[in-house]
Image: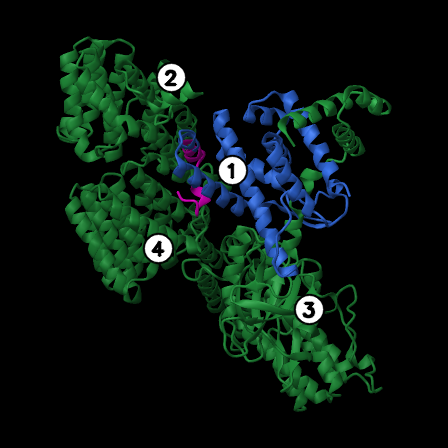
Chain colours: A blue, B green
Amino acid sequence: MTAEAPADVTRQDVTVLLRAWGGGDAVAASRLTDIVYAQVRAMAGKHLRQNASGMTLQATELAHEMFLRLLEAEVEWRDRRHFYGVVSAALRNILIDTARARGSEKRGGGRAHVTLSAAEELVGTEGDASGLDEALRALQAIDERKHEIIEYHYLLGLKREEIAEAIGVSVPTVDRDLRFAKAWLRERLAP
Amino acid sequence: MSDARWQRLQALFDALIEQPAATHEAWLAANEPDAALAAEALALVRAHLDDEDTDSLTARIGSAAGEALCEPAKGLRLGPYVLLEEIGSGGMGTVFLAERVDSEFDHRVAIKIIRGIATNDASQRLRRERQILADLSHPNIARLLDGGTSEAGQPYLVMEYIDGSSITEHVRAAAMPRAKRLRLVQQVCRAVHYAHQRLVIHRDLKPANVLVRADGAPVLLDFGIAKLLDANASGQHQTQTGMPWFTPAYASPEQRTGQPVSTATDIYSLGALLFELITDEVPRPDAEGRIAEPSTRRTRDGARGGDRELDIIVGKATHPEPDRRYASAEALANDLERYLRGRPIQAAPDSVGYRVAKFVRRHAWATAATLVLVALAGVFVWRLAAENERAWRAEQLAQRESVAATRVVDYLVGLFDAASPEKAGARPISPAELVDLGVRDLADQLDEQPMARARLYTALGEIYAKIGQTEKGIATIERAIELQRGSGDDVALARSLALYGNMLNTSNRFGQAVEVLDEGIALQERRGDADPAVMAEMLTSVSLARGRIGQLVAAISDAERALTAAAKAGDKASMLRGEANNALSEAYIRNGDNARAIEIARRNVAELETTGPESTLLSARTYLAAVLAEESLFGEAETLLRGVLAQRLRTLDTGSDWVISLRNQLAMVLRNDGRPVEAVAMLRENVEAMKARGETSTPTYSVALNNLGSFGEHIGDLAFAEPLMREALALAEAETDPTSSRPDIYRQNLGRVLMLQGEYREALALIEREIVDDGSEDRRIARLRRLVGLAEWNRLNRRHETAASFLDQAQANLDANFGAEHPRGATIIRARALLERDLGHLPESEALLRRALAVIEPSAGQESNPVTELRLDLADVLVRRDQRDEARALVERVHANVYAKFMLDSAPCVLFERLAATLGIKTALQEQRKAA
């Protein structure tokens, strides 16, 4: 049962690791990250969809499948939050990796600007997704919780109730934060 | 921004969006003295109002990544290659000129990057097929050199780079005379024939895929690539047809209508190409696929497009019915040769049509077999066509039909035999699909040829067995035997019975297997000239079957006879010897002589490593692992099994019987090695694989369910175990094999799980049912478990005297059947200890628990679950006797194992937590609950 063979990983393993992590076991944390990362990689292909504009990675569906596969229903909220954090990091990384590969093809290297990219309606002008990444980093620096909520909502597709439970705030607070963070990002990205 | 400002900003924002937009500025002026902050709040609210409903962010995440995946560009590195420039692009992908970066000399290749992302399954298929194409080595075929998947997950193929122009451009530019053009087509035909002989069809022959190099040699590109793309794009279904990839002007009617493609498909395209080279005109087939006669066309220089004979050649090559075309590309090349030399061509339309019709009428059976094959896989048609030609000659020689019949059947056997993953693992077909179609079509054909039909059933049944689809194999071979019984064809019947017995064994139907095999052996013995190979096979199978149903002495003597027969079996000797040795070793182990069994198994593996066919070697290793596990040599057993599993998975599907039984065995080893959680995961994979295959009513499936359930019980997950055991029992009870001991075993299993959950009424009905003593070990164990189960039931229901009496019976049973020192005795001792405890006889209970531990520790291991449970029982009694120090030591001793090897809500876990709380031991679970 190694990260190289994600099919063998059971939800019980993940629960055990999460529990160990919760208890401060750093090895468990990195082990879990390996597993999640391998799973995301293994599953990414399946969640690529062909549509009119090309291929799209259905990150949200992927995240849901990850949860189904790896998360036991009775995992405690604290562990759940750890898990969400790891999954969104893995998703973000895989998006960046692919975009970086593309960047090196097209522009002879250079920093890739993706994360929550291609959000043209946020960005304003098509193709210039570079700002979104920066805006998200800025948001994270000012208000980590809002950044986390944005990621859980957009990247993982979590429901408001799930976000509320995971980070330990009320649902109206999630709504408020989400509304505010969205407006803030949009305003910042406006041309 | 400071925290305070940030919060203030959000407060302003929240307040503003509750108000009408028109009042915003006024409200801010009244409420926010800081003008900068007010402006910022206003901007935020505008951003919010601007775009409240466009929320497609989620759906669009990652589209940049997706684009990157489908748009490779030059400069990109793929493995050791770097892309230089795009040289073509089409529906299937983009072609680049590329070169090896690690090569000193100029080594240029063409790389085709296939659109879309391969699923795991598709990439595996792609890899397999690529291997076949890579083996095509012909001067007129561009080689497939390599292939792989880019980092972004896109499959690509590396091909020999051909610097040349398309055949049509080449002949036009060179203003080549017709005779030379026909010579070129001939060369192309011979290259196509070469590939057909290797069972590869091009599927997309057209001018763009036939380049002519500067030296004048034609080179075929993309051989078999269309199939690869199919394999990449979709499931196996479509690989049978050529649907997605073809070029209309050169595509055969069967391709356009999505029928299975065959070598005849390529012949059609060759005919179309021939037409174009004769007339300088792109062919325009009519609705039926007919192409105009070249002589009705004018070439560019105004000359007539050929003569009557070329009309006939093109007409025959492009006939709408695949069967009426040239039998092979070589035959087309040969007719062109005759034409060029001015000799009469073979394709005289009337006579050929006539002859074909006549052939079909006179050989309805052979044609039927042909149709089966065509439906099965066009890939093989060339061979059959060759076979047809031979049959046709046979007709001229007035040979008897039966001779040809036998040949077709033998041919079929050889064909499928070669397609079995065991032998090849890499043919461009899916064997399972092939056989399914074969069996289905056979049902209403060859009515007047029952023997031919029976032999086909036997052959197809054998293939099912080879690809691990035992149940289908059994159903198929039963049809063969039905036809063969009483037909007088004893040789065929014996062979079918041997196969049948073998499959029944695989399917765990041992009683039935013994019956069938005894019949086969008797049949062989009655004949003077019994085939030693078939004899050895049957004796080995019957030995295994007898061993499983407790006929142990006979099992040893059968295996020894099998060894003798195997020695006379010629080139099959080492394989049959290997199998007989396994059987012999198994017979010894069932007789309790483990040392002898291990010795035989080790020697067998060593022998096969030098002589043996690989598949026999793998079985021998698997078997050796089983014997080693019996002797608790788990490490060695696990290594062997994992090796064999990896090897098998190279050619077999994850749901095939062999893979499933390997995983079962591995799970057993893992469990006994104290890794129950890993074992459960492994078994779960099995159950899922069988479900995916739709085999949910077979004995093998019930065994898998029961195993998974038992393992669930082992880690204390009763709620998980119960439904699995219920389903397993229902399936076992529906079985018709009266010798099967499964219903008895499964009733005990389910009864026990129900009892442990407090479902006493239903549990009792299952546990108390009588079990006949038929001498088999399985039933002897079940009888002992029944007595212990009844004792436990009565103890739990506070009928202490009855419980004690059942324990006495159980002990007597153990002494008589297993010997007093048998590890199974530990369950009796434990049950008695718990009874004494319940009666308040604590010192007696303590002594008994210590004895139970002493009995079970050596065989189960210090860290095993039964030992952990007994330690907890002992600690419990010690606490009641106020011997807290030893109790504490025991509880601490099992701490890690309880968490690692039991479910958190299992009885042992609950007992552990209770004891720990009493003794003041901090547990991980308590800590966690506190923290939460």
Residue that protrudes farthest toward the bottom in the picture: B341
Choose mark 2 or mark 4, whichever is in front: 2
Residues indicated by labels 3 and 2 sit on the same polypeptide chain = yes
Choose mark 3 or mark 1, whichever is in front: 1
Near-viewer residue (A187 or B854):
A187
> Is residue B851 found left or right of B2 in the rendered image?
left
Task: State how far apart marks 4 and 1 are (Cα).
Answer: 62 Å
| Tag 2 near tag 4, CB within 8 Å | no
Label 2 sits on a secondary structure element that is helix
Q: Chain of mark 3?
A: B
If you read the primary sequence from the N terminus, does the residue marked by circle 2 or circle 4 appear first?
4
Q: Chain of mark 4?
A: B
The residue that disc 3 covers is B88
Near-viewer residue (A175 or B315):
A175
Amino acid type, callout 4:
Ala
Disc 3 packing (10 Å; few <14; some 14–19; many ≥20): few
Label 1 sits on a secondary structure element that is helix
Residue A52, horizontal then vertical, whole percent = 73, 49
Task: State how far apart marks 2 and 4 are (Cα).
Answer: 47 Å
Q: What stretch of residues is rendered in magenta?
A: A1-17
The residue that disc 2 covers is B762
Task: State how far apart marks 3 and 2 are (Cα).
Answer: 72 Å
Choose mark 4 or mark 3, whichever is in front: 3
The residue that disc 4 covers is B494
Tell me if residue B568 comes above or below residue B803 in the rendering: below
Amino acid type, callout 3:
Gly
The residue that disc 1 covers is A86
Amino acid type, callout 2:
Glu
**In percent of the image, x 47 and y 41: which residue is there?**
A33
Q: Chain of mark 1?
A: A
